[in-house]
């Protein structure tokens, strides 16, 4: 840092402290810092730097040019400061500055606890030098009640030792206080962490108890349902029984075979794709006693790390069912992999027109992975895109005649309620009329996946 007017003022204060009693005490440095802060707007580090640089220059001048030079130099620095303040119109006259410097030097003399006669003499010399003898009554009265101690080397050394002991004592007290503060902070942190751990444990126990209760109630409901051997679909009760033939179920006297995807066949024919559930690579559990709650619980158990929105799944399931409930021949099936599926004309084979289930983003979409609910609909026309859900209405990657609508949140349902309702009714109508919309026959799985990614905006 270059030399500034602030350095001049610091040089004056340091000169007064040293010349008046031969030593600059730590308390005097502290007082000088306070006086500098009252005149110059700067941070602590800047003030420290200015005082340090002025102190270094003062010591250099003392060693190279002697005390007589110092006596002239520190006064010259004060007068330079006074002139600068007048030029900047901070004060009216230089005498006003000198009077303030005398008062501040008097406070500086008192800052170490003792005022020596040498300090008093130096102040009187400055008053006379600047012609302030009759200009300020406060200068005449400032000595009233102040004990003046005769300076001697022995007296000063004792005083300096006392100051040093006080400094050590203060530093020790500060260290003890800081130790106690840190200890208290550590104890408070440990108590807070213990409390948080206790609350977390209690929350985990409560959650475990709640889940155990829910599982027990679900199990009891299943057992009661199985005992009654009766199911209810759309308000109509059906008797159910498993036939001796493995995997075959019978609903209201009609037998249905389980759906199994073709093995080792990349291409899916038009007729075959009608028989395949949306997740065609797995066997669908269409057991008559598998419920929506079973699907939710089973999915959470098999995918514990996925961030699923249970309320969103419930909303979509209720939405698709409420729109078409009461339709003649309507069947709904809940399965482990297919979620909630709707069928028309009392047909599980070639009867599906809508489905909703949990899903996650494709790995080609990048990270972070997203979780949502997919609503599959039977195509009722070639252009299945929904403008308000541009990259959410997509070609199904599993079957050509279906398209899928991604629903990320409740707003996707609420803001598109009318168009989704219209599309669902159109899918039901298309299934009832046995009218399937496909681009061409024998669409391969690879080609379906390509169309799906293209609709997502991934080339």
Image (cartoon, rainbow, N blue to C red):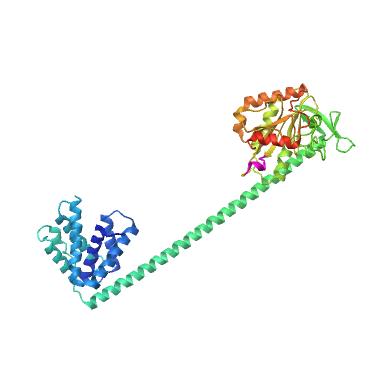
Q: Against 208, is 406 above or below?
A: above
Q: Is 192 situated left or right of 359 in this image?
A: left
- Asked which quadrant contains residue 311, the reply is top right
Residue 293 image point, x, y percent: 72, 38
Relative to the observer, which residue lies in front, 281 or 32? 281
Between 416 and 403, the one nearer to me in the picture: 403
Q: Nearer the viewer, residue 330 or 84?
A: 84
Location of residue 383 with respect to 154 vertically, above or below: above
310 is higher (above) or lower (below) than 440: below
Magenta residues, start to end:
360-366
Q: State the quadrant of the N terminus.
A: bottom left
- Which residue does the image show at 85% across and 37% down from the upper left? 247
Instruction: Count every numbered label the image shows and give the total.
Output: 0
Q: Quadrant of residue 101?
A: bottom left
Q: For the view shown, which residue lies furthest in the left direction?
A: 134
Q: Residue furthest bottom?
A: 154
Q: Residue 344's x, y, as percent?
A: 77, 25
**Left or right: residue 45 compared with residue 16:** right
Q: In this rendering, is residue 368 above or below 77?
A: above
Q: Residue at point 84% right, 28% down? A: 252
Q: Where is residue 303 in the image (x, y as percent from the top left)?
A: 70, 45
Question: Which quadrant of the figure has residue 113?
Answer: bottom left
């Amino acid at each position: 840092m270059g030399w500034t007017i602030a350095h001049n003022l610091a040089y004056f204060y340091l000169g007064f402290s040293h010349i008046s009693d031969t030593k600059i005490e730590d308390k005097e440095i502290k007082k000088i810092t306070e006086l500098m802060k009252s005149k110059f707007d700067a941070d602590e580090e800047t003030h420290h730097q200015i005082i340090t640089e002025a102190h270094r220059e003062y010591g250099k001048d003392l060693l190279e040019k002697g005390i007589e030079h110092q006596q002239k130099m520190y006064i010259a620095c004060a007068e330079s400061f006074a002139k600068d303040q007048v030029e900047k119109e901070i004060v009216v006259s230089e005498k006003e500055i000198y009077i303030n410097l005398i008062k501040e030097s008097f406070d500086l003399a008192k800052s170490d606890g003792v005022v020596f006669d040498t300090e008093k003499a130096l102040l009187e010399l400055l008053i006379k030098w600047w012609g302030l003898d009759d200009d300020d009554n406060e200068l005449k009265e400032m000595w009233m009640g102040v004990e003046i101690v005769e300076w001697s080397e022995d007296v000063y050394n004792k005083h300096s030792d006392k100051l040093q002991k006080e400094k050590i004592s203060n530093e020790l007290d500060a260290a003890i206080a800081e130790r106690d503060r840190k200890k208290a902070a550590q104890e408070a942190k440990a108590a807070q962490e213990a409390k948080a751990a206790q609350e977390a444990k209690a929350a985990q126990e409560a959650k475990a108890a709640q889940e155990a209760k829910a599982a027990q109630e679900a199990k009891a409901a299943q057992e009661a349902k199985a005992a009654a051997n009766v199911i209810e679909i759309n308000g109509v009760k059906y008797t159910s029984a498993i036939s001796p033939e493995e995997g075959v179920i019978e609903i209201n006297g009609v037998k249905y075979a389980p759906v199994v995807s073709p093995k080792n066949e990349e291409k899916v024919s038009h007729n075959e794709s009608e028989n395949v559930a949306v997740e065609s690579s797995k066997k669908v559990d269409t057991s008559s006693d598998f419920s929506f709650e079973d699907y939710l619980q089973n999915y959470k158990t098999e995918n514990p790390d996925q961030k699923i929105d249970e309320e969103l799944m419930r909303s979509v399931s209720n939405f698709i069912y409420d729109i078409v409930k009461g339709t003649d021949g309507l069947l709904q099936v809940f399965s482990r992999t297919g979620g909630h599926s709707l069928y028309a004309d009392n047909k599980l084979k070639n009867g599906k027109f809508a489905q909703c289930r949990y899903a996650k983003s494709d790995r080609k979409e990048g990270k972070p992975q997203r979780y949502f609910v997919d609503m599959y609909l039977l195509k009722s026309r070639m252009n299945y895109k929904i403008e308000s859900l541009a990259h959410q209405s997509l070609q199904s990657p599993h079957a050509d005649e279906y398209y899928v609508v991604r629903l990320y949140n409740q707003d996707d349902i609420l803001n598109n309620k009318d168009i989704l309702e219209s599309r669902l009714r159109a899918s039901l109508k298309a299934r009832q009329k046995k009218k399937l919309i496909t681009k061409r026959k024998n669409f391969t799985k690879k080609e379906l996946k390509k169309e799906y990614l293209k609709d997502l905006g991934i080339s």
